[in-house]
Amino acid sequence: MTPLLPFVLLAALLPAAEPPNIILCMADDQGWGDTGYNGHPVLRTPHLDRMAREGLRFERFYSAAPVCSPTRGSCLTGRHPQRYGIPYANTGHLKKKEISLAEVLQSKGYRTGHFGKWHLGTLTTKIKDANRGRPGNTKDYAVPSDHGFEVYFATESKVPTYWKKGDYQGYGTHYWTGPDDMVPASEIKGDDSRLIMDRALPFIREAAHKKQPFFTVIWFHAPHLPVVSAPPYTDGYTKNQDYYGCLTALDEQMGRLRAELKSLGVEDNTMIWYCSDNGPEGDDSAPGSTKKLRGRKRSLYEGGVRVPGLLVWPAMVKGARTIELPCSTNDYFPTVLEALGHPLPPEQARPYDGVSLLPLIKGTMKERPRPIAFQSQKQISLTDNRFKLISTNGGKSWELYDLVTDPSEKKNLAGTHPDQVAKMATQLAAWRQSCENSAAGKDY
């Protein structure tokens, strides 16, 4: 485990109030338009809709990357994936020298558990498993218990969203609960979102009964391919039944989670974050909806990185609010730490890309204090409170969009706003150099 000296020295700053429980929920490849509350004409998501009615609904919430693995690392570190060696899906692993949110919270007495998709390293070196697990491959091995999670029920990567008889043996991606502890086929059947929640709820229940604060990561596989569903989730859908059905099944589990928290008496002091890891798979004819945003998964245009974003935390969020400021999965880490009275170490010790959203939650943040930077292969971009600078060729040419008036990125303003382009390109260049320094190990 990574030494946590910078954080341990700040332990005295913890407030006397009971620390909040934290739950990070994430869908896989859910588009910005793939919810009822965001106007989908067919899809049933009553529990997500309720979260939007009762908490914070983020109109501009961004995954740190347009593909899955890099975004997931950002949730746990507060840092852009270019810094910690996972620049794209199925590449690298979360380095042991990274400080994860689970490690910090575990050092503060939290019970920590991860349930669902991991995708930050392989989970076995003994058998062939998923995308990269195979006998003798130790290079990419990184299990949740290496990064502060006491309990886990995890797959390396994607699986079917509904398990039919024989799927588990034939698909080749397994659930693991510890090093070389593979879950047997007899325990894997039916809707996958339910299976994940079946494991998460007893973990939460045990912590609540012990009056121990808990940090729970619940990362669903839906609606990532292979998309499969079944009645009753598919009932009423006349087309795209598997896609819509698996999202309705996921939504049901979000309702189940909230009902459990209420029955345990811990609902008020629990923050539940919900988002997707990137935009929807496929082209414009595929069922995933970006709600007319440009681009999809793998793209740094809005449709690839602007995703559903929700927060319910009754103790702090007393009523529904729509948040127009840009926010990101990078922001989880600093937000949770500040909620515990636990500031980040100095910037020179280790750069963080996220900002604390606690002032926003309290209603005092009027603008994002610094922009959100992105890099994915040859694509680079920078998003501030109004403008977005993007290049699809590594900075050889630029496009500039006013996201307040043109969220679909139809009107390129680069030719008429050269000063804004120059300013943001300079910021982006400095950020990229910082990431290169991090990738070279200079933060450690």
Image (cartoon, grey):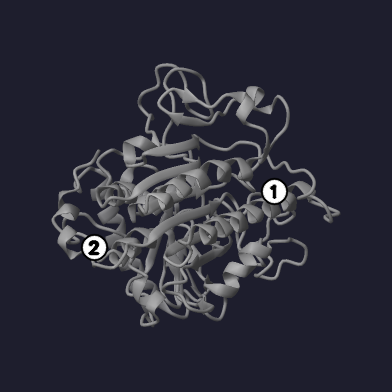
Mark whose residue sits in front, 2 or 1 = 2
Q: Residue furthest front?
A: 209
Residue underneath mark 1: 246
The image quadrant where one finds the N terminus is top left
Mark 2 and mark 1: Cα distance apart in space: 38 Å
* Residue 53 visible, this orientation: yes
Q: Work out whether 225 lies above or below 25.
A: above
x, y percent for residue 306: 54, 63
Tally the numbered discs: 2
The residue depicted at 40 percent of the width and 49 percent of the height is 207
Three-letter residue code for mark 2? His
Residue toward you, 117 or 382 = 117
x, y percent for residue 156: 49, 34
Residue toward you, 441 or 412 = 441
Q: In this image, 400 relative to 351: left or right?
A: right
The residue depicted at 47 percent of the width and 74 percent of the height is 414
The image quadrant where one finds the C terminus is top left
User: In the structure shown, which secondary structural element does the residue marked by tag 2 occupy?
Assistant: loop
x, y percent for residue 298: 54, 50
- How crowded pointer 1 is (Cα within 10 Å; few <14, some 14-19, many 20+) is rated as many
User: In the structure shown, which secondary structural element does the residue marked by tag 1 occupy?
Assistant: helix
Three-letter residue code for mark 1? Cys
The residue depicted at 57 percent of the width and 38 percent of the height is 158
Q: Quadrant of residue 97?
A: top left
Q: In this image, 226 relative to 5: left or right?
A: right
Residue underneath mark 2: 342
Q: Work out whether 417 lies above or below 352.
A: below
